[in-house]
């Protein structure tokens, strides 16, 4: 099924959404959908029997900085019943990028969305467990953004060696001496 | 009689537990021996390979992606090269396709042998590990023959292969194919009807077919639950549609079913290798004839000025790839192994993303072990075959 037929079928399910076919080099039908209509579109993609995209193979994002809109979240879906693939894309702005979660539709999206939040800083509204996945919890910034410097020198914020000044050291020694006496 | 004091205990399994195949940390809540909840913590091996790849030239990414999933190195680099070839619009020569299939299947056997050995050892069958690593050694010798490097040969190149197959490679593969089936029978003698192994694995870590699909676990795990999804059959790539092979499936969805599926897959892979050896064209190009991408052979580099310049350009500037994005998936040892590649038209990738089957398997781990016994956790971790380098990348 080509992108046009998919759009026609989706348009029936989600009448007020706008779908747009995109050019794709790898011959996979590619659709853009607006962020606010993503949950309905995703549900229709999974549940309608003529679509039946039961498997979310991949969820990732690309940062096209400095282009606008800056981010694209990409969902690669597989329909086991009809043996076809689909690439669904959502474009997000540079300021406050956020999109609804699809964990309710494909539970496997949980960690994939956490990874995108961790590395791109894209918020998934309604995500059940919005924590960093790969980077440490106290990490600053989103490493896969294009404006994130590559070779960065970070001062360690955790597990710093215990450091005392000369005065504190002497005070400790004095305190020990007094307790012993 | 004094009242017995009971309380829920939290146990930290890992990150340095010997059976976690890398550094996976599991925080388990236990009521006696029953697992009440499990929270996997990952990221200990995160080395930012995807960010590093954005700073490299296209051909420099190949060794990087081989180090993601270190047990299926050549499946990774094959998927990556195929996605870049898609962007370039290249069609590789027929001989390359056959050789790639041969290498990918040998890689699957290799990976499954490591899995079987370590999984057997974890559930108490230590001798299985020795048997499996004995055969793996022979397969690693093949890699050494190919490229001089046993684990990460970097033999796949964009547009083809690094060089043609070495002399004697066919004979070496044939001698493995002749002796291997008997060796698999030996493993099966040790495990398939072993009462202890059956008790440790049957009915343990069950995941239903629908859950396996919803959690995105295509590959041996879903096939053990009854889903026959296999990229080689559903979306044939290379020349898999010209080969006769079956996709083994089971319906039980437990650790034992996953064992059965993987052992059957080893046999199927050997069957494919045998067919490939028969059909592989004896002569042909080992890479596309595109002077922008394929470096000239070494003897010409040493004797001709033009070849030297061409060689120098490819290795200093690299080659440019048209802007666009491509996703190509192959059936790796752990399931759908895909690469999502974005180019902005320059000689460096804009984004390289690997679809990590181990990440999704690790996510579904909680679902398989909650409600079971703590001793079964080890059997289940072994059965989903996670490679932490692939999880954390």
Image: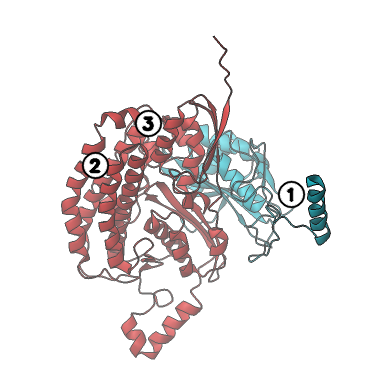
**Which chain comes out red in the rendered image?**
B
User: What residue does disc 3 label?
Assistant: B254
Q: Mark 2 falls within which chain?
A: B
Q: CA distance from mark 2 to mark 1?
A: 56 Å
Look at chain A in the picture and name its colour: cyan
- Read off the residue under disc 1: A96
> Which residue is found at the position 41% from the left and 60% from the top?
B77
Which residue does the image show at 33% across and 37% down from the upper left? B124
The crowding category of the residue bearing disc 3, from other C-alpha atoms within 10 Å (few below 14, some 14 to 19, many at least 20), is many
Work out whether disc 1 and disc 3 sit on a shared chain: no
Pointers 2 and 1 in contact (C-beta within 8 Å): no
Q: Nearer the viewer, mark 2 or mark 3?
A: 2
> How many C-alpha atoms fall within 10 Å of the one at disc 2: few (<14), some, or many (≥20)?
some
Marked residue chain, label 3:
B
> Residue shown at 46%/46% (left/top)?
B358
Identify the image quadrant of residue B152.
bottom left
Residue with the mark numbered 2: B187
| Marks 1 and 3, how far apart at CA | 44 Å
């Amino acid at each position: 099924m080509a992108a046009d037929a998919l759009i026609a079928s989706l348009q029936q399910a989600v009448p007020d959404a706008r779908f747009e076919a995109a050019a794709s080099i790898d011959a996979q039908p590619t659709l853009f959908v607006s962020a606010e209509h993503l949950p309905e579109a995703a549900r229709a993609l999974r549940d309608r029997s003529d679509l039946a995209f039961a498997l979310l193979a991949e969820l990732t994002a690309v940062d096209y900085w400095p282009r606008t809109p800056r981010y694209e979240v990409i969902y690669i879906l597989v329909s086991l019943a009809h043996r076809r693939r689909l690439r669904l894309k959502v474009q997000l702005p540079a300021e406050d990028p956020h999109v609804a979660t699809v964990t309710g539709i494909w539970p496997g999206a949980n960690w994939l969305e956490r990874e995108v939040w961790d590395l791109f800083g894209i918020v998934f509204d309604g995500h059940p467990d919005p924590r960093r996945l790969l980077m440490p919890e106290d990490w600053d910034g989103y490493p896969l953004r294009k404006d994130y410097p590559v070779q960065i020198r970070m001062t360690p914020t955790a597990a710093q060696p215990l450091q005392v000044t000369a005065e504190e050291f002497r005070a400790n020694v004095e305190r020990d001496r007094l307790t012993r006496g | 009689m004094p009242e017995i004091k009971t309380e829920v205990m939290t146990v930290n399994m890992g990150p340095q537990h010997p059976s976690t195949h890398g550094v996976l940390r599991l925080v388990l809540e236990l009521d006696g021996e029953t697992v009440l909840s499990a929270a996997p913590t990952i990221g200990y091996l995160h080395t930012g390979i995807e960010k590093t790849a954005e700073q490299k030239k296209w051909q420099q990414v190949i060794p990087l992606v081989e180090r993601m999933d270190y047990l299926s190195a050549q499946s990774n680099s094959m998927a990556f090269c195929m996605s870049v070839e898609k962007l370039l619009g290249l069609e590789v020569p027929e001989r390359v396709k056959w050789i790639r299939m041969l290498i990918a299947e040998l890689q699957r056997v290799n990976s499954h042998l490591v899995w079987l050995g370590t999984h057997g050892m974890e559930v108490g069958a230590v001798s299985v590990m020795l048997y499996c690593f004995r055969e793996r050694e022979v397969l690693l010798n093949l890699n050494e023959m190919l490229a001089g490097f046993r684990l990460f040969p970097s033999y796949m190149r964009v547009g083809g292969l690094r060089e043609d197959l070495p002399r004697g490679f066919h004979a070496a593969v044939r001698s493995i194919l002749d002796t291997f089936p008997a060796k698999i029978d030996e493993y099966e003698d040790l495990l398939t009807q072993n009462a202890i192994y059956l008790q440790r694995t049957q009915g343990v870590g069950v995941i239903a077919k629908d859950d396996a699909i919803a959690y995105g676990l295509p590959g041996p795990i879903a096939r053990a639950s009854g889903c026959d999804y296999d990229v080689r059959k559903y979306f044939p790539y290379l020349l898999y549609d010209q080969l006769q092979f079956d996709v083994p499936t089971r319906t039980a969805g437990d650790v034992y079913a996953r064992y059965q599926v993987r052992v059957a897959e080893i046999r199927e892979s050997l069957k494919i290798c045998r067919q490939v050896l028969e059909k592989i064209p004896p002569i042909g190009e080992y890479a596309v004839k595109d002077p922008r991408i394929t470096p000239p052979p070494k003897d010409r580099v040493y004797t001709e000025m033009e070849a030297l310049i061409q060689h120098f350009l490819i290795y200093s500037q690299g080659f440019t790839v048209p802007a666009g994005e491509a996703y190509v998936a192959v059936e790796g040892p752990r399931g759908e192994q895909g690469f999502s590649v974005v180019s902005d038209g320059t000689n460096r990738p804009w984004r390289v993303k690997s679809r990590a089957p181990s990440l999704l398997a690790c996510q579904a781990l909680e679902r398989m072990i909650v409600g079971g016994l703590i001793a079964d956790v080890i059997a289940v971790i072994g059965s989903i075959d996670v490679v932490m380098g692939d999880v954390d990348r």
